[in-house]
């Protein structure tokens, strides 16, 4: 099938590439000329396992094209995806200006029937707005071309996006037109293997499904962080509690890992946006507000543990902290809403210096923080330890899982480890002569 994708960000690029990989002819369009030029020359703007070779191979075979020419791209597609960003507005609701700008462009150029697909995470009711915007742009030029607007949210995880796209656990299609449903079923047939993965529903339910999924996952994390904080107070170990509850299939093992708070481009934004939507409809979503405020507090927790160790904040002045992990989670260079940002800000405010290492996010950190005397971005995990007083682990990259504790003891002047992802066995660290602080572990 002929597919057009607006937006070559995370979602658009991965979706477009995977659709090309299974044989569709995909044209990706973006207003960012440099990005499109880069993609044509094999420069992939994001780090995502498996993506680069797939983009290059499909581009070389002509199944995947990149352009800034919106009119030509619209002429190409039987199915036209909108996969542009929906950044949070000042009040936390999703900013639809980019989505609606694309809708207007589609209405201005569409010459033959197409299915327009909302892939971006958009609030309930957006499909109606997209439909109205296309209709207005079409009316302005006196045209009347048939089109459907469908909601087809994505459930990609950064760091596993290609895998999630190639082997989805479900494909949600929200549509009110039999023709559109048929077309999307054909489009996704190569991914719908072994058992039925396509769930068809009305448009608004599909839009809400996306938010419900992310809000549920965020709730599990904030819930566990709340339990971790209680565990800390009462002298219990949340890691034991986690093992004690996960085997109940109604609870499950996934997403019950306490830590330094959730980050990324999705959970923080989507929980807020859903709460705002509820509010706009006259409902106060108390649970969602709590999920958000627990997370906000949790991002400060590592710093609080550090202050607890040193007695007070003033004692941090002039100290140097090795920080392992800056990305909001492993296998990505993304630092949006990352817990590391809160930690670094608080350490700097307290007059401390940071030596940070992240396998992928150093470049992004340099872009965000710029040159500053209280930050050194290191090439290796061991470099970050040079001259450091203590170690703080913020992201659970695999390579941080089993350091040589004896070497840490020698390297760290104050012999303290703050483990923001509960990677280590407290007893083992303490046996090596280091002070250990984890999340919800009574120490
Ligand atoms: C999330 C969802 O998991 C995807 O299903 C969804 O498609 C995506 O948002 C989206 O809306 O686009 P993502 O933001 O890439 O994916 O990352 P996650 O793996 O879900 O992690 C989010 C955050 O939660 C990370 O900061 C992670 O460290 C934290 N987390 C996760 C915990 O603190 N504890 C856990 O048990 C799990």
Image (spheres, rainbow, N blue to C red):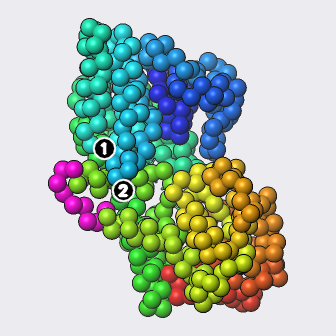
- Could you tell me residue 42's position as x and y percent? 69, 29
Callout 2: CB less than 8 Å from ligand 1:
no
- Decide: few, some or many residues near mark 2? Use Cα within 10 Å; few <14, some 14-19, many ≥20: many
Vertical placement of 324 versus 142: above or below?
below
Vertical placement of 244 versus 60: above or below?
below
Q: Could you tell me which quadrant the C terminus lies in?
A: bottom right
372 or 381: nearer the viewer? 372
The residue that mark 2 highlights is 271
Q: Is residue 315 magenta?
A: no
Query: Magenta segment, which residues?
Result: 280-288
State the residue at coordinates (66%, 81%): 316
State the residue at coordinates (65%, 55%): 369
Inspect this view and state whether residue 11 appears. Answer: yes
Q: Could you tell me which quadrant the N terminus lies in?
A: top left
- Decide: few, some or many residues near mark 1? Use Cα within 10 Å; few <14, some 14-19, many ≥20: many
- Could you tell me residue 431's position as x and y percent? 72, 90
In screen coordinates, is 372 left or right of 13?
A: right
The residue that mark 1 highlights is 123
State the residue at coordinates (59%, 66%): 345
Q: Residue furthest left?
A: 282
């Amino acid at each position: 099938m002929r597919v057009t994708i607006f937006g070559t960000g995370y979602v658009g690029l991965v979706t477009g590439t995977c659709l090309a990989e299974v044989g569709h002819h995909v044209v990706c369009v973006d207003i960012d000329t440099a990005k499109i030029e880069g993609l044509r020359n094999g420069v992939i703007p994001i780090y995502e396992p498996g993506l680069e070779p797939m983009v290059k191979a499909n581009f070389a075979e002509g199944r995947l094209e990149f352009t800034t020419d919106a009119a030509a791209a619209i002429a190409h597609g039987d199915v036209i995806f909108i996969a542009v960003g929906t950044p949070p507005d000042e009040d936390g609701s999703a900013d639809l200006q980019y989505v609606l700008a694309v809708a207007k462009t589609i209405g201005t150029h569409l010459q033959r029937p197409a299915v327009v697909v909302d892939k971006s995470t958009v609030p309930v009711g957006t499909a109606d707005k997209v439909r109205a915007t296309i209709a207005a742009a079409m009316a302005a030029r006196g045209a009347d071309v048939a089109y459907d607007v469908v909601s087809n949210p994505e459930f990609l995880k950064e760091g596993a996006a290609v895998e999630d796209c190639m082997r989805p656990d479900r494909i949600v299609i929200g549509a009110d037109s039999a023709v559109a449903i048929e077309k999307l079923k054909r489009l996704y047939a190569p991914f719908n293997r072994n058992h039925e993965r396509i769930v068809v529903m009305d448009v608004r339910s599909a839009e809400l499904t996306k938010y419900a999924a992310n809000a549920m996952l965020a709730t599990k994390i904030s819930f566990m962080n709340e339990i971790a904080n209680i565990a800390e107070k009462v002298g219990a170990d949340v890691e034991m509690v986690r093992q004690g509850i996960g085997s109940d299939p109604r609870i499950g093992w996934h997403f019950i890992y306490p830590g330094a708070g959730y980050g990324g481009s999705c959970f923080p934004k989507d929980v807020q946006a859903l709460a705002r939507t509820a509010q706009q409809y006259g409902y106060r979503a108390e649970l969602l507000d709590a999920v958000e405020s627990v997370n906000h507090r949790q991002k400060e927790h590592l710093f609080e543990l550090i202050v607890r160790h040193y007695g007070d904040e003033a004692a941090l002045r002039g100290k140097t902290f090795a920080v392992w992990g800056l990305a909001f989670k492993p296998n990505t260079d993304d630092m949006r809403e990352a817990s590391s940002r809160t930690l670094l800000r608080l350490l700097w405010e307290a007059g401390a210096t940071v030596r940070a290492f992240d396998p992928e996010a150093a470049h992004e950190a340099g872009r965000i923080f710029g040159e500053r005397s209280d930050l050194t971005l290191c090439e290796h995990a061991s470099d970050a330890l040079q001259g450091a007083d203590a170690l703080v682990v913020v992201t659970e990259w695999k390579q941080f899982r089993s350091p040589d504790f004896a070497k840490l003891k020698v390297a760290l002047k104050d012999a303290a480890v703050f483990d923001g992802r509960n990677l280590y066995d407290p007893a083992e660290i303490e046996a090596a002569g280091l002070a250990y602080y984890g999340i919800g572990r009574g120490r």
